[in-house]
Image (tube, grey):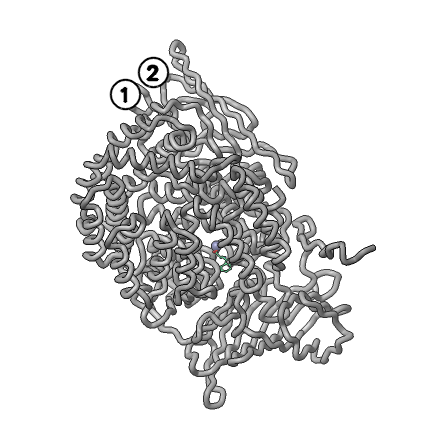
Amino acid sequence: MNIAANPVVEADQTVYLKDYQKPVFLVDSINLDIQVYAEHTQVDANLVMKRQTEGDLVLLGRDLELKSISLNGQVLNVSDYTLDSEQLVIHNAPNEVILETSVIIHPESNTQLEGLYQAASDLYVTQNEPEGFRKITFYPDRPDVLGVFTTRVEADKKYPVLLANGNLLETGLVGEDRHFAIWQDPTKKPSYLFACVIGDLAVLKDRYTTSEGRDVALEIYAEEKDIPKCHIAMEALKHSMRWDEEHYGRPYDLDNYMIVATSAFNMGAMENKGLNIFNTSCVLADEEYTTDAAIMRVQSVIAHEYFHNWTGNRITCRDWFQLCLKEGLTVFRDQSFSEDLQSAAVQRIDDVAVLKAHQFPEDSGPLSHPPRPDHFVEINNFYTATVYEKGAEINRMMATLLGKEKFRKGTDEYFRRHDGQAVTVEDWVAALTAGSGVDLSNFLTWYNQPGTPKLEATGEYDAVAQTYRLSFKQSLKAHAKYPNLKAVPIPVALALFNAETGEQYTLQSEALFENGVKDGVYLFDQEQASIVFTGVTAKPVVSLLRNFSAPVNLEFNYSDEELAFLLQYETNGFNQWQATQTLLERVLLNDHDAAIYVQAIKNTLPALVEKDPLLASRLFDVPSEGYLGSRIDENYNPAVIQEKRNALLNTLARELGQFCKETYLALDPDLQKDFSQAMGVRALKNIMLMMLARQGDVEAFDLAYSQYTNTRNMSERLGALRVLVWNDALQASVALEDFYARFKDEALSLDQWFTVQASHPNATVESIQTLINHPDYDLGVPNRIRAVSGGLNSNPVNTWSFGVEHFVDLAKYLDEKNPILGSRLLQVLSRWYTLAEPQRSDVLASLEALKPQVKSKNVVETLNSMLSI
Ligand code: TRP
Ligand code: ZN
């Protein structure tokens, strides 16, 4: 055999759910001693373990330099264990083990932002979910091994802050220049929830008294200059703590709750027990420096990580296939919290918009997987919109079906049964079923299969009998890896409106689900079925999937007039928005006449702007080019979509020009009664300003420049800057220079400066290169990379032309340096196969060319999936 001609076949690295086995040893307690030095860090660990089943003692470890190892007081010889790049295996270990190891690690050169890493010159932090702890010490690093952690952290005194999970037991000095702190977490936890922080940070303090009377010290750590930007997060934290007591009966369980902000972070935030670590973008919030959208995000992420204390930490996952158990439930909880915080309808609009713009495309392409996958190569690749957002929708469907009271009985039962355990999706559904008394077991199908179901519905009105029959059919696209697809239970929330009067019928049907809720919910759980309503005195217009009661693609043969009717007469803002979006998709993707839409918007918007500016800002929104593109499965030509969308916007600017100008001049965010209405007014004004510029109003740029200059609010400033920059206004460069001068030391604001320019509709290779060559561009800071590549990607015409090389180059560069991020950025190109030729072949060639150049499991798995279409 000619070896050189054959590529090395790597051992299959796929992990399967069906291969799950209980851990051989459990850990009672672990004592960690972490000594940080400039050039290395020493980690000494003492593990007290007990055998649970037959087998070898397996400790996972990666990039660890083993200095010493002893078992029950005896130093081990190299022949007593086998050590490779992933694990240390001790054969014939006794039933009770005390294992002591000492290793050297290098956080100062760890660019992967996983394990312990130096995040800034004066800060070290950890990120251990899902498998980072094995980069700190040898350990059974899996979520079903729960132990009590005691942590000693020692470092130079130039790092005054030394934190770990739990209670502070002791602090002291080591010689002249060094000090230490010892922390103990009384709650047993898996290693992915371990955290420690070593740094020079300032702190904002507050207190909270739980429903049980526990006095909790709250602390948010950040750079000194950022402390004033931590108040919104602190309020959100206290609010979340109260909300979880009131809505789920869950009080907090430790005497302190700490949050640490860092700008070197791959994701949003991490729920480490009692010591959350946050991306600065998800904790710092201040009108002057961050946008309204960012402020809303801070509040929801604070809530999300806090809610994990019960759904994730006290009850954790048995294995990583169950990731959506904690993420799907916690996202559902944070969405519900945010619905209470602002307008419930607008929150639902924003959440569904994210679901449809990210999860639906993911689930219809080569990266499609079930919310609970049954195999993976690299678990980091499965922190996806499907696991998080579709996972949340599954919980929402069950909650919708049960109604408030029964859902609460179900969650109570879950907490009662499983507190302190590492469990599965089956355990969750079984507890909900037992607590509520309603059998939900067929919802497991939703967790186990990929794809967005298609829901086809038809309606027939019988004027003589005064009945209305709705018939449903469901189907799923075939999937090579998941062949046995089954029908899923689909709760269809619906209403009937009298087409002549606009009034809502009181629903009469025996097939409606009894959940104590006024709205009708029909549980459609077969491949085909129908439901009949009686007492329907005139032809109805049906509103289906109200509040988006199920994550499906609905096909119903509405006339455009009926959709326009719903846009105007639906009583719930979410449903109005949904009708508007459906109508716009027809205009933009199926060449329907825009006139009906324009008339309905003209009829609806003026009153709505007065009554609810926040909702008005969403209703007046036109789907993005990216979203529209994701609805096309073949022969996709981004330039055509861009052209059609621009044509619609031009029509709107022309038809509503006068109204836009009057509204722009009349609205004042400072006169609104609360933050959310003021946010609505700012959003509306920015849309109106964009419309004025599009009309060619000679005053538009003067208005924009004066809005830019006369505000301290970031949403207003950025909205104006965007209009100037995107339209190449004369004032654009002065405003950009001013923005830079004001915010050059404010990383989150400066990210916006990069994004505004990268998202210019006529951005070019050169303009993007100028941004990348800027001294403030930094490939070590994920937020900065995303500021540019996210901006670029907001224009699909650019993504699919010069953007392809941009993303391929990033994936190549990050493959070793930060594979988690590299893999995520590459996913931007996952729908390459939908493009029309010759673009399709061009992108394919670029992806094929990348293949031999990447090594990480993260990027390789993503690339292989992308190419296996
Ligand atoms: N569990 C975290 C959350 O809920 C997210 C997370 C997973 C994460 N892996 C990460 C965060 C890696 C940072 C880095 O939201
Ligand atoms: Zn989470």
x and y, in percent, of residue 247 in the image: 39, 49
Residue ID for mark 2: 538
Most extreme residue toward the top is 464
Give percent across and percent down for residue 461: 41, 15
- Label 1 crowding class (10 Å Cα cut-off): few <14, some 14-19, many 20+? few
Q: Of the residues shown, which amino acid type is indicated by label 1?
A: Thr
Q: Which quarter of the rendering shows the C terminus?
A: top right
The amino acid type found where label 2 is placed reads Ala
Indicate the position of residue 669 as horizontal and vertical percent values.
21, 49
**View extreme (bottom): residue:** 176
Q: Quadrant of residue 605?
A: top left
Q: Is residue 81 above or below residue 466?
A: below
Number of numbered discs visible in the structure rendering = 2
Q: CA distance from mark 2 to mark 1?
A: 9 Å
Contact (Cβ within 8 Å) of mark 2 with mark 1: yes
**Which structural element holds mark 1?**
loop
Q: Name the side, left or right, on which 74 lies relative to 27.
A: right
Q: Is residue 388 visible?
A: yes
Query: Which percent across, then down, holds residue 812?
Result: 56, 58
Q: The N terminus is located in which quarter?
A: bottom right
Q: Is residue 22 above or below residue 459?
A: below
Instruction: Using the rendered image of the protein, determine whether residue 245 is visible from the camera's viewpoint.
Output: no
List the residue tagged with mark 1: 501
Q: Secondary structure at mark 2?
A: loop
Q: Is residue 447 above or below residue 161?
A: above
Displayed quadrant of residue 844:
top right
